[in-house]
Amino acid sequence: MADRKWNLQGVWRCRLCWWLTGAVFASIVIIEAIILAPSYVNYERDLLQSLNQAGQQATRAALPAAGDMPEAALDSLVGRTLVRGIVLHHGAGEVAGEPLTTAPRDDSDLRHKRRRGDGDWLEVRWSAADLGLPWDVSARLDASTVDSELTAFVWRISGLVLLITAVVTVTTMAVLSLLVLNPLLAFRRRIIAAGQDPAHPLRHLADQPGRDEMGDTERAFNDLLRHNAGHLAELERFNNELARFPDENTNPVMRAREDGLLLYANKASAPILDCWGVAAGQPLPAPIRDRVSVALEQGQRQRFEEPCGDQHYILHIRPVSADAVHIYGLDITDRKRYEEELRHRTWHDDLTELSNRAAFEQRVGQVVNMVSAERGLAVLMMGLDGFHAVNMTAGRAAGDVMLRETARRLQNALPKEAMLARLTGDVFGVLLLNCPVDDAAWVAGIARRLVRALERPFTLSDTDYRCGLSVGITLAPADGQTADGLMRNAEMAMLRAKADRRTTGNDPVAFFVPELSERMSRRQHRLNGLRQALDSDQLVLWYQPQLAATTHEQVGVEALVRWQHPDEGMIPPADFIPLAEDTGLIVPLGRWVLTEACRQASAWLQSGHGLRVAVNLSAQQLLAPDLAGEVRALLQQFRLPAGLLELEITETAVIQDLDHTVSVLAQLAELGVCIAIDDFGTGYSSLAYLKQLPVHRVKIDQAFVRELPTNEQDALLCRAIIGLAHNLGYQVIGEGVETAEQAEWLAREGCDELQGYHFGRPVPGSGIMLPNPPEGADLNMPGQQNRGSA
C-alpha cells in the first residue's frame, strides 16, 4: 500500500493514463454535445414563446375591446412596443407599422415563423378569442434579441461543459496515478530487481498487497518468489550433500582458494587436471584463476565450456564462502560429438561423404565474386548415364556401392584444390578455381579426364556394369555471376550433353551456350501448354488398326494420343510425351487416355461392334498405388468386357520395380484384361523374370521390322522373338509394317497380328472400319491363346 501515493509528475509521462483520460474526455464532450443540441432548440422555442406572449399582452392592452379602431392606438402600439407591424382582419383591415410581406404560417413551432432580411422578425397571427377582441390580428414582432440570448446560452453551457470535463479529467488522471500507475511501476521495479538477484528471491516480497486486482497480481508474484526460494533451498541442500561426498561423484568436483590455489579434486577430475597440468596444492591455470576471482567478486556462478583434448566439459565455479569456490564439471563429450555429426551431415552427403548441394552452392556463392579478368572459375555438373537401369537390375545396395566408387574415381581424377560434391541421386558437381579465363580447353580436358575415369566397368556381385558420364560446364564470369545462375546453366549444359550422347553418340562434354536458356524457355512454354491442354479438352485419341497376319481381318486398334493445339494445329506425341514423362504429367495424361479409350470401346460395343483397344501404360502409371482398382472402376463405369481392353507396357517399365510390376499385372490379368509387352527386344529383358509376367502378347519393335526381309540380322532376331514368344505361350504382333513384303514375311514366320502404315495410318475413332464379332465370341476372354495353352 505504500506505493499508492500521488505521482503527478509520473502520470504526465504515462501513455496508458493519457489514453484512458483522453477516452474519458472525449466521452464527456460527446455526451454534452448530444445534450446541448435539443437544449438549444428548446431554449430558442422558450424565447420565441415569451416574445409571442409579450406581443399578445401589448396588443390586448393597446386596442379597445369594441367600437372603431382609433388610428392613434395603432400608431402607439407599433411605436412603443415590440410590435413592428400589425394587420387587423376586419373588413378591409387596418395596417400600422411595418407591413407584413408574407402571410404567417399556421404552425405551432414559432421557430418556423421567424423572418430575416432587413431585420429579425417574428410574424404571428392571433385569433379574436386569444386576444378577447373583435378582430383577428396578424403581427410582426421584433426578435432581434433572440440570437444574442441564444449565444449567451451556448457560452454558458460550453463553459459548464469545459468545467465539468476539466474536473473529471484531472480526477481521472489522479485516480489512475494513485490506483494504477504507481502500483504498476513499483511492481515492475520489483520484477526487475528479482531478475537481477535470482539467488535471493525472498528479498523482493511485497509487504502489504492491496485488495484489488493489482494486489492479487502482487500476491501471485510473492507466491512465485517463495516457490523459487524453495527450489533454491533444495538445490543448495543437494549441492551441500554432493560436496560432502565428492569422491563418490562420477563428475569432476574441485575446491579452490580465492588466489586460485587448488585445494582438492576428486578422482573424476583427473582428465581435466592432466589437461591443465596441475595437481592439488598447485595454482590453477591463469584463465581459470581469473574466473574464480570474478565469481567471488560478483557473488555469482561462472559457467563456461572447457575443451580437454578429445573431451569437452562444462565447468561451474560456485562461491561457497568469501574466500573459496567449488568447481563442478559435466562431461559433454558425447553431446559435442553429436553436434559435430549434425554439422557434418548438414554439409555432407551421407553415402559418399562428399560435400552436399547446400555446401556446394554456398562455396560457389563465396568464390564467384573473387573472379578476375585473368583467373575465373568453372562449375561442372555431371550426370551418370545408365545408372537407373543398373540400380533397378542389380538392386539399390549395389547402386550405392557404385555411387561410392564413382565418388572415389572422380575425386582421384581432380586437382587437389577442386571441390567435388554429390548434388542429387546420380548427379555430381565440381568447382574448379583459378581457371584461365581464355582457355576453355583446359576445363574441357579435366572434364574428359572425369569421363575416362568411369569408362572402366564397375564390378558388382561378380557382374560388370558400365555407366557413362555426361558433363555440363559453365564458366564465370562469362556464363553467370551468381551461384544459382552458374549451377542452373551447368545443369542445362549437362542435359544437352545427355541428349546428344543418347541420340547421336557425340562428345559427352558440353559447354553452356545462351541458346540453351532459350531452349529451356521453350520447353517451359510447351509444358505450360500441355497442362492447359489437359484442362481444356485439346487432347484427342486416334486409333491404328491391328490385323490378323494371315486373313488381314481387323482384330483390334491401338489408341494413340494427339494434341490438337488451337494455334499450332496437330502436335505429334513425340513432341510432348517425353516432356510429360520428365515432369510427371504422364500420370494424369495416361489416366485421360485410358478413360477415353474405354469410352470409345464401349461406344463401339453399344453399336454392335466389339473391338479390342490397346492402351500404352507408362512406367509411372505402373507404380501407381491402385492401378488395378482404377481399371476395374473404368470397366464397370462403361460396362466394357475386360477382354476388349489391352494394356501395353515396355520392358524398361517392367524392371523399374519388378516385384510391384508382377503384382499389378497379376491383378490386371485376374480382371481379364490383356497384357502386352511393347517394343519387345529393345529393353533389358531377362527370361528369368519375363516368364513370371502374366503376358498375352509381345510386340516386335519396328526397329527390327524396318529392313525386313533383306536384313539378315533383323530377320534372325524377329524369327527368334516369334519362336521364343510362342514357346512362352504369347501371341506376337509385328509393329511398323510398311510394305507387303514385310507383311508376307512376318505372316510366313508365324507372327499372329500386324500393325503399320501398310494397313492404315492412325485415324479418329469415326474413321475406323468396324468388324462384326464372330458368333459365340466370348469378349471377357483376354485372348485366343494364353500361356496355359502353350
Image: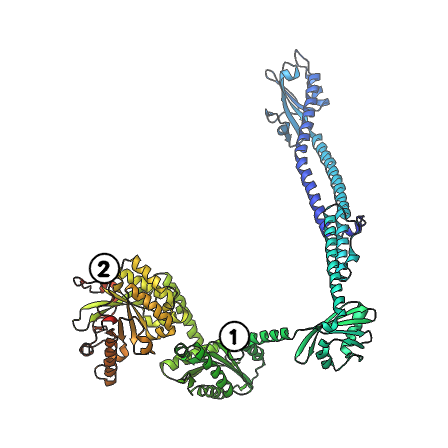
Callout 1 environment at 10 Å: few (<14), some (14 to 19), or many (20+)? some
- Residue drawn at the location 21% of the way across and 84% of the way down: 710
Secondary element at image label 1: helix
State the image quarter where residue 192 is shown: bottom right
| Any part of residue 576 in sight | no
The residue that label 2 is drawn on is: 605
Question: Residue 209, position in %: x, y?
Answer: 77, 49
The residue that label 1 is drawn on is: 484
- Residue drawn at the location 58% of the way across and 81% of the way down: 370
Callout 2 environment at 10 Å: few (<14), some (14 to 19), or many (20+)? some
Secondary element at image label 2: helix
Q: Of discs 2 and 1, which sits in the foreground?
A: 2
Specify whether 661 is left or right of 46.
left
Specify whether 401 is left or right of 277.
left
C-alpha gap between disc 2 and disc 1:
56 Å
The first of marks 2 and 1 along the sequence is 1
- Along the line of sight, the residue nearer the viewer: 398 or 564: 398
Amino acid type of disc 1?
Answer: Asp
149 lies above or below 718 = above
